Amino acid sequence: MNKLDPDQNVLVLALADALRLRGWRLVTAESCTGGLIAAACTSVAGSSDWFEHGVVSYSNESKTGLLGVPAELIARHGAVSEAVATAMAAGALQRSQAQRAVAVTGIAGPGGAMPGKPVGTVWLAVAGRESLDAVFDVRATLLQLAGDRAAVRGQTVTQALQALIASL
């Protein structure tokens, strides 16, 4: 994804405006998208006003080491699960000065499917807080996306941007 899809560009601009209006910042924690959400956000000029950082935690070890996702949680539920997506978003938010975090973990394909988790299965979580000392809320959504690897990843970016906007 070298160039932002026009619809995604509109979403990023709307997200930027909403975050700037509040003086808030965003962090991302990405597995299956490999940094595409962060890339979409930073593709617009002035994103340093509202984008803090992104973490690509592709391996289970990086989810644990970089985001604090308990290894037992991954062992019990699998990396592609509501529990892990929620822990990724919470970990990203806790390790930042941001008010919003988005996390995605999924199976983009063509391989990796398992019983009950076909290609296109993605868990998306958004964590938010009003201020740095506030208790935060995390909400996760299961996506079942169609298409090849590029399509699943592109749809995940769009869904993540939409979820972030809705959280504001």
Image: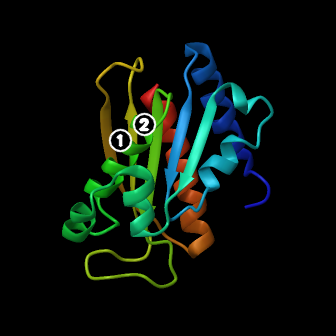
Q: Is residue 84 above or below residue 99?
A: below
Check disc 2 and give the amino acid type.
Leu
Q: Residue at 61% of width from left, 56% of height from top? A: 35
* Residue 63: x %, y % from top left: 41, 59
Q: Is residue 111 above or below residue 141?
A: below
* Residue 32: x %, y % from top left: 51, 65
From the viewer's side, name the closer residue of 28 and 133. 133
Q: Judge from the rendering whether residue 4 lies leftward or rightward of residue 62; answer left or right.
A: right
Q: Judge from the rendering whether residue 48 lies leftward or rightward of residue 52; answer left or right.
A: right
Q: Residue at 46% of width from left, 38% of height from top? A: 101
Quadrant position of the N terminus in the picture? bottom right
Q: Quadrant of residue 139?
A: top left
Q: How many marks?
A: 2
In contact (CB < 8 Å): disc 1 and disc 2? yes
From the viewer's side, name the closer residue of 166 and 126. 126
Q: Judge from the rendering whether residue 28 lies leftward or rightward of residue 82; answer left or right.
A: right
* Residue 122: x %, y % from top left: 41, 62
Check disc 1 and give the amino acid type.
Ala
- The reply to whether residue 114 is in sight is yes
Q: Residue at 36% of width from left, 77% of height from top? A: 118
Residue lying furthest bottom: 111
* Residue 76: x %, y % from top left: 18, 68
Q: How is the image coloured?
A: rainbow
| Element assignment for label 1 | helix
Numbered label attached to residue 90? 1
| Element assignment for label 2 | helix
Numbered label attached to residue 93? 2
